[in-house]
Image (tube, rainbow, N blue to C red):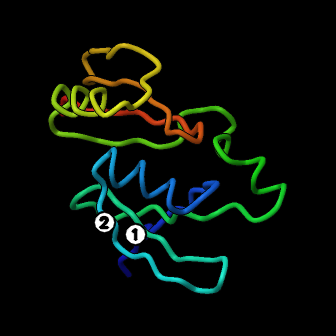
Amino acid sequence: MGQHISAVALVVPDYDAGIAFYVDTLGFDLIEDTQQSETKRWVLIAPKGAQTRLLLAKADGDTQSAAIGNQTGGRVGFFLHTDDFEADFARMSAAGVNFEEEPRHGPYGSVAVFRDPFGNRWDLLQLTS
């Protein structure tokens, strides 16, 4: 039986703010944006060509709101792989992405940590092999 992770939920304060960052700033594709009720939407985004998607889930209540930006306990929780680190780092920097550090280059490849506007930490990563 073939399996894969189809989506991972990412709690955001607002659907449109999530779309603005991930689609407009990072260049992800907006896969689906379906209204499910007056307050709930099904919003799927993904890097171009990716199989696994992010489900942008608007926080509902104090507990979910408190988790925004800290869903992985302050650790890097999301890993955006690229095949052109230098170009993506330059493009993302120019678009205003908040990198926490200068790129690091090692035998494994290149990496730089950034935060989305909600506080979630990401690696932009290009592996050598």
Dot 2: few (<14), some (14–19), or many (≥20) neighbours within 10 Å?
few
Q: Residue 90: x and y, percent?
A: 22, 26
Q: The N terminus appears in which quarter of the rendering?
A: bottom left
Indicate the secondary structure of the residue bearing disc 1: loop
Above or below — where is 15 with respect to 40?
above
Q: Residue 78: x and y, percent?
A: 47, 43
Query: Quarter of the image holding residue 101?
Result: top left
Q: Residue at x 16, y 30 (%)?
A: 87
Q: Are marks 1 and 2 in contact (CB under 8 Å)?
A: yes
Q: Residue at x 33, y 25 (%)?
A: 111
Q: Which mark is residue 51?
A: 2
Q: Of the residues under marks 1 and 2, which one precedes in the sequence?
A: 1
- Amino acid carrying mark 2 in the image: Gln
Indicate the secondary structure of the residue bearing disc 2: loop
In front: label 1 or label 2: 2
Q: Residue at x 70, y 61 (%)?
A: 59
Q: Is residue 77 left or right of residue 109?
A: right
Question: Residue 22 versus residue 73: which sits nearer the camera?
Answer: 22
Dot 1: few (<14), some (14–19), or many (≥20) neighbours within 10 Å?
few
Above or below — where is 128 with respect to 51?
above
**View extreme (bottom): residue:** 37
- Amino acid carrying mark 1 in the image: His
Query: Quarter of the image holding residue 112?
Result: top left
Q: Residue at x 44, y 27 (%)?
A: 98
Q: Residue 89: x and y, percent?
A: 26, 28
Q: Which mark is residue 4?
A: 1
